[in-house]
Amino acid sequence: MRKNIQLAGRIIVLTFLIFKGVLGQAQVATIPVNTLSASEKEAGWKLLFDGKTFNGWHSYYETDKPSKGWTIVDGCLKNAKGTGRPRTGGGDLMTDDAFKDFEFSWEWSIQQGGNSGVYYLMQERQHNPGTLMYMGDDGTSPVSFEYQLVDDERHQDVLQNGPIRSTGSLYSLIPPNDSKKLKPAGEFNESRIVVQGNHVEHWLNGTRIVSFELGGTTLLKAIANSKYKSVPNFGLKAKTHILLQDHGDEIRFRNLKIRVLPEVK
């Protein structure tokens, strides 16, 4: 009799734990995306993507249309897989609005072996072609600072060139520090860019991984030793659109939000 009571008790506890786990998973699954909490609204955050439309966004090239390869799937902006080369998916997608001092936050998930990025402090060159930036470029592509988004474990650019081309780096200029913690390809990561005055930061999953000063010695030396050295005014502070790069690989973006920060002289 005593053994039966103990067994029944264990079954009840096990059933409760299973039910609690299922309920917890359901709660996680139903957390709304592309929404702002009351505290975020109070802090000045604004959504850049409503989860349903392309409102607030347009293609970088006037001849492209977002529907060329971008779709909205499960509350995400999804770029279609291309050939792994720039502009072979949906084309670069950029905000209608431009910002000067800001904090930009977003979540992203990339396919295995994929490559993409977020551009800021961007120069548009459609009508004023300049330095060729990559194989196949005609000089009209955007040139900018880039928060790199890539599969660190599999993409050849990272395997061959190391951290300076890895996720969270200021692409080809400043690598992330050792506190970086990246979730694997296929899972969602949370990233953030902060630009205030001449100070810039990159964050990944709640940790600051890059920090530098515009016009500072570290950045200027990095630019002088990079492909950007011949780009006039590269890295100067200016009002900027934010661009989601099409590098020809599938990637999803959600919870894109921004808040304007006080200007620092």
Image (cartoon, rainbow, N blue to C red):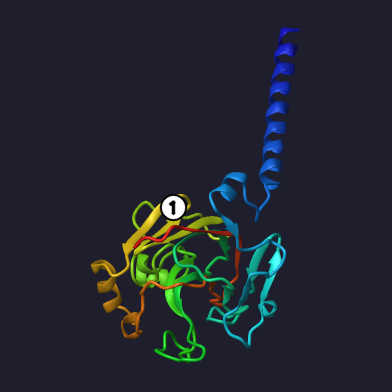
Residue 87, how many percent across, how many down? 57, 82
Which residue sits at x=54%, y=53%? 44
Which residue bears the numbered disc 1? 181
Judged left or right of residue 87, residue 219 is: left
Residue 132 vs 49, above or below: the answer is: below
Under circle 1, the secondary element is loop
Residue 7 vs 67, above or below: the answer is: above
Hey, which quadrant is residue 122 in on the image? bottom left
Which residue sits at x=26%, y=67%? 216
Q: Is residue 182 visible?
A: yes
Residue 77, how many percent across, how many down? 64, 66
147 vs 220, nearest the viewer: 220
Q: Quarter of the image containing the C terminus?
A: bottom left
Which residue sits at x=48%, y=52%? 205
265 vs 249, nearest the viewer: 265
171 vs 16, nearest the viewer: 171
Which residue sits at x=47%, y=61%? 102
* Residue that protrudes farthest toward the top in the picture: 1
Hey, which quadrant is residue 211 in on the image? bottom left
Q: Is residue 225 visible?
A: no
Residue 259, how many percent across, how many down? 52, 58
What type is the residue that disc 1 sits on? Lys
Judged left or right of residue 152, residue 15 is: right
Hey, which quadrant is residue 168 in on the image? bottom left
